[in-house]
Amino acid sequence: MRHCPLWTRTARSSWHFERGGAQAKQPHESRPALGNFIGELMALGAAFSFCLASTTYTLAGRKFGASVSMALSLAVSLIFLLPLHQALYGEFFPMAASGQRWLLLGASSLAGFVMSALFLLRAFQMIGPRLTMLLGATSPIFAALLAWLLLGQRLPPYAVLGIALVLAGVLTVVSGDAQTNRQNTRVGYRRGLLMALAAAVMQGTSYVLMAEGVTDDFPVMSASIMRTVFALVVLWLAIVLRGNLQQNLRLIVDQPLALFHIALAALTGPVLGATLVLASLQFTSVGISSTLTGTTPILMLPIGFVVFGDYITKRAISGTCVAVTGVALLFAA
């Protein structure tokens, strides 16, 4: 017998996912310690998935460009997500999702996929990638603050210390040497800093909205499809309005290898990585999830060394050690 997901509204305007008429129980209510541990593992798994996606995005981006690569990968990701959703929930698309759920997940998609990406691209142009990554690594701080203000999530002292150590390690890795940062003094420097910080705020906002969007055990794959569809419509609409749709379509047809890289990026990024992030938010706090997912620059070090021949500095090694200590504290907390 096929069990279709049902969502019912309670008196407190929250939404509960049910199966076969039995209300699902929150994981925090039964096994909080194990639930947090599972959520932390999922967040680290998402960080590793995003490492693989970044590598394939880089290879594909040399042929297409950032916005087209993202739009293509989101389209390809639906090819993976929709059949899986059919197999798990008996329908290709989460038709029973409420308007409130669509609003939350659509807003998280707009903040994370679209607005944050636009701010990042502008910051890259104005202050360079290294300083942009440095400021972008502060997004877990904004996520934790917003989760505390809006959701009432409070972190224990060991978790706060762990987050601080992870952020310090990531900032050490992506900051580079002083010479690299000094050459970013040009017209628009302050505006570039604001753009990078705005991207970090948008990422933090996206995490809070995602956390609210997957409350009450809402299926994470349904949420992932909803976010993907929303971002897909916005990105392709932007491409059409810019008037370069035909040029991009010709590039897509002429670059089969780049399309293969896009498919790998879609599988590891929007499918696996984004789904793991959404799942982790059902088990652990926004601050911890966003911090562990933000360890991608640390995990990228060996991949960059093997794939692109990047040199691993002593600074990067020391930053990695600090971040690993912070991760250990988060798991212990």
Image (cartoon, rainbow, N blue to C red):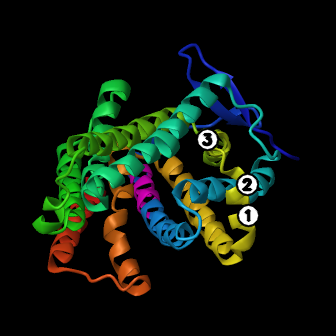
Query: Amino acid type of disc 2?
Result: Gln
Q: Is residue 194 magenta?
A: no
Closer to us: 144 or 331: 144
Q: Nearer the viewer, mark 1 or mark 3?
A: 1
In percent of width and height, residue 138 lies at 26, 48
SS under mark 1: helix
Q: Label the magenta part by its dominant secondary structure.
A: helix
Identify residue for label 3. Answer: 238
Number of marks in picture? 3
Identify residue for label 1. Answer: 250
Residue 22 as seen in the image, left or right of residue 67: right
User: Which residue corresponds to the image point at 66% horizontal and 68% vertical from the top-left?
Assistant: 263
Q: Is residue 39 magenta?
A: yes
SS under mark 3: helix
Q: Which residues are magenta?
A: 35-44
The numbered dot on residue 259 is none
Kindly indicate whether the residue at mark 2 contacts the one at mark 3 (C-beta within 8 angstroms). Answer: no
Q: CA distance from mark 2 to mark 1?
A: 6 Å
Query: Amino acid type of disc 3?
Result: Ala
User: Which residue corresponds to the image point at 24% horizontal and 61% vertical from the top-left?
Assistant: 170
Kindly indicate whether the residue at mark 1 contacts the one at mark 2 (C-beta within 8 angstroms). Answer: yes
In percent of width and height, residue 186 lies at 20, 51
Identify residue for label 2. Answer: 246
